[in-house]
Image (cartoon, rainbow, N blue to C red):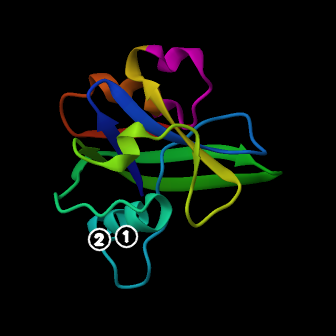
């Protein structure tokens, strides 16, 4: 699962230092954990942010792609959370707490087209009005 974490017109994206593209913060659920519990745990583990609000499920993504000489099928639950009073808002280019090779950056949503994002559904999230099921093949 992944989180579309926003503040006003900004969105937080992550990038592995060894890769060229940006993606959404998130991770995998542990056995017995539902995706909403997992995304809240991931927010805390990766960013040190404890959410007391319930993130809203905005998209289920089925993504088929080729990665490192393998065909991959990925199912991602994308949640949305707007944050207002948090120290993360004032940070820029900060490391993910549980991974030393990932950097986080706040981007203006109007300028996402200027950067490489994966999966490509990221470009449509600022204008998403209703829940979507997206298939990328």
Occupied quadrant, residue 44: bottom left
State the residue in front, 99 or 32: 99
Instruction: Tell me the tag on residue 41.
Output: 1
Q: Residue at x 71, y 52 (%)?
A: 71
Mark pair 2, 1: CA separation: 6 Å
Residue 27 visible in the current orientation: no
At which x and y percent is residue 47?
45, 57
Toward the viewer: 6 or 39? 6
On the picture, is 23 further left or further right than 78? right
Q: Are marks 2 and 1 in contact (CB under 8 Å)?
A: yes
Does residue 111 lie above or below 57 as drawn?
A: above
How packed mark 1 is, by other alpha carbons closer than 10 Å (few <14, some 14-19, many 20 or more), is many
Image quadrant occupied by the C terminus: top right
Which residue in the structure is indicated by mark 2?
Answer: 37
Q: Secondary structure at mark 1?
A: helix
Residue 12: image x %, image y %? 44, 39
Could one spot residue 23 in this view of the protein? yes
- Residue range in magenta is 111-121
Position of 58 compared to 22: left or right? Answer: left
Q: Quadrant of the N terminus?
A: bottom left
Query: In screen coordinates, is 44 left or right of 136?
Result: left
Residue, x 32% and y 65% (percent of image)? 40
Which label belongs to residue 17? none
């Amino acid at each position: 699962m992944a989180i579309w974490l926003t503040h006003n017109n900004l969105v937080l994206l992550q990038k592995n230092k060894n890769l060229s593209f940006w993606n959404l913060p998130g991770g995998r659920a542990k056995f017995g954990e539902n995706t909403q519990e997992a995304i809240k745990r991931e927010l805390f583990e990766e960013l040190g942010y404890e959410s007391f609000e319930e993130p809203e499920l905005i998209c289920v993504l089925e993504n088929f792609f080729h990665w490192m000489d393998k065909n991959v099928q990925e199912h991602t639950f994308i949640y949305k959370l707007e944050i207002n009073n948090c120290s993360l808002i004032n940070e820029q280019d900060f490391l993910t707490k549980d991974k030393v090779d990932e950097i986080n950056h706040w981007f203006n949503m109007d300028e996402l087209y200027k950067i490489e994002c994966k999966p490509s559904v990221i470009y449509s999230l600022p204008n998403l009005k209703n829940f979507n099921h997206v298939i990328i093949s």
